[in-house]
Image (tube, rainbow, N blue to C red):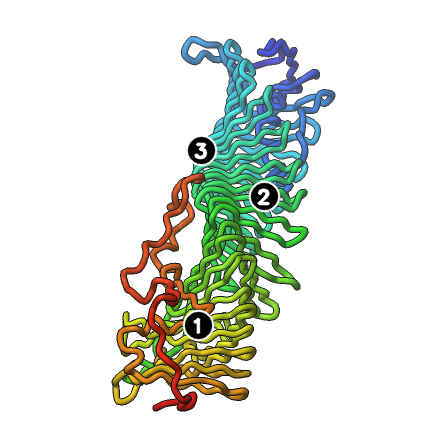
Amino acid sequence: MIANRKTFEFAYNLNIFFRYSNTRSRYEIAPPRGLIARALPLVFLTILSSFGFAFLPQCLHAQQHDSLTAIADTLVANNINGEPVEELNGHMQFRQGSLYGSADRAIQYLKTRRTELIGHVEIHQDTLSLYAPHVLYNDSTGIGHADGNVRLFDRDNELTAHEGDYDVQNQVARFHGHVTMTQGKTTSLSDDLTYYRSTETSILTGNAEIKSDSGSLVADTITHVRALDETTAKGNVLLSNDSLRLNSDWFYNSGSLGQMLARGHVSVEDVKNKTTIFGDTMARFAATKYTIVPRHPLLLYVDSSQVRDSTGKMVTTFDTMFVRADTMKVWQGDSSRFVAIDSVRMYRSNFSLIGGRLVYDQVHDIMTVFHSPRQRVWNDSTEIDADSIAMLMKEHHVNRVFAVGHAFATDPLAEFPNSGRINQLEGETMMLIVMRDTARQLYDMSSALSIYFLINNGKPDGVNRASGDTIRMDLKNKQVSRLAIISGTEGEYFPERFVGDRAAAFRLTAYERHTNLRPRREEFVMPWELPAMGTPIASPPPPTTKEETPTKPNPTTEQPQPKEHHGAERR
């Protein structure tokens, strides 16, 4: 039936009046609410004023005091599947206050209280526009639905999705299927998006990603609460920008509190410094530029350098430094420094150490180790033990090692391994000079004592025991090649006939060597691969070589008698 000048009672108990025009059907719908105004304005007009983007304006309610005018080519009373309907066909347009829109046609289901807009649906209010091929609103459930590639625009903000729903009563919007939000240079992608207007909370699920000029955040699920400026990401989290890359199972960031938290398989890579910290938990505080990683963290530093191979060709080589401790702390900025606390162990191809606490001052390139009864450093076969150790770095490589407080250095004689022939140096302060990761010279600079085993024509040739103000050991091919006493020389020489198989008896009083404590590469595993908390971490197995076990002189062993001193050097 084609409508004429008569009155209909639509669903929702609204009295609707219309006037007929000779050219097109024009309908004027009186307050309190109109057909189209009730059908969709709340569906998508409040969606996503969140996620830090301030995406859309506040809820644009239906204009309760403005009449709605709808224009169509025809108004037809019809029946669809046994339900009475009224159809507005052909170039349907509507307006109510600042709200207006259009569609190819509209259908009002009188019994089930549904309104359907079909074909090239457009809804506009102020700067906001919604486009969809199909829109359906159910007044019984208070849920509006748009499908067939939905597009939503507000100024420079844009949202697209395959379909979307809005629950008027609970004020919840849901978009599904390749959801994309763009505001300026920031874009978010997800399979689904849910927005809770009452709490201004957005939830991106399924391949969720946020991208901008400053970086990106990727996760299985991303939740943002605009009112609190809080973002939470769960599952396969990856945060990346120009300065860092963070991976974790769970991530939280509060802009208002300046806090960043992560847990579960955490890794934080400092792109500039080429360092990565692994841990089970991480916390960062923006105000103090302070980061803490507790529970057995692991730090990796990957270094690369250009060297010539056997053919003279320049090739790139890589060397990784590992640091493990109970806790790690990092400060950035003008006082940039790294601190490893308790049970510190560091390993590099030819350099390693253990100690109580390690502090790396990145501004001055100085690394100190202390806070343990004894700190221990190994470079090649040389071991140095002291109360505290400081290292001057150069381009992340050790350049100088200072051992302070009851320092003791040992280096076994490579030509006669497991013979107990170990060169020793004892003093209050020592300095090891390192060039290109290789020890070159060792200075004992205070109250120096030494034991130095000699070789002549490839055969053992006794031992020198000497003291002086300063003693210098020259190292070549990772072995002691020369010992020199610079001043205050005193000493004695024991010929080989007094040494023989008793080389282990020639020890300084403070002798100590602990090669069994030296860190090894295989112990530096990811924190989540370590035993559970409360289970002690297995110590490295003891060495099988004789000389690696700490040895003290046996007081019952017959001591050779001193002989006339033959000098500090014997070649």
Question: Which residue occupies the foreground of this view, 388 or 248?
Answer: 388
Q: Mark 2 vs mark 3: which is more N-terminal?
A: 3
**Quadrant of the rendered structure where residue 260 is?**
top right
Q: Say what amino acid the circle numbered 2 marks.
A: Asn
Q: Say what amino acid the circle numbered 1 marks.
A: Leu
Distance between mark 2 and mark 1 Cα atoms: 57 Å
Percent from the top left, x then y, of residue 475? Answer: 40, 82
**Residue 476 visible to an observer of this rendering:** no
Distance between mark 1 and mark 3 Cα atoms: 87 Å
Mark 2, residue position: 253
Percent from the top left, x then y, of residue 173? Answer: 55, 29
Task: Identify the element where label 3 is drawn.
Answer: strand
Q: Are marks 2 and 1 in contact (CB under 8 Å)?
A: no
Q: Mark 2 vs mark 1: which is more N-terminal?
A: 2
Query: Counting other residues with Cα less than 10 Å from the Cα at mark 1, is it few (<14), some (14-19), or many (20 or more)?
Result: some
Q: Are marks 2 and 3 in contact (CB under 8 Å)?
A: no
Distance between mark 2 and mark 3 Cα atoms: 35 Å
Against 349, residue 564 (above or below) is below
Q: Say what amino acid the circle numbered 3 marks.
A: Gly
**Residue 502 visible to an observer of this rendering:** yes
Query: Counting other residues with Cα less than 10 Å from the Cα at mark 2, is it few (<14), some (14-19), or many (20 or more)?
Result: some
Percent from the top left, x then y, of residue 521? Answer: 36, 59
Mark 1, residue position: 508
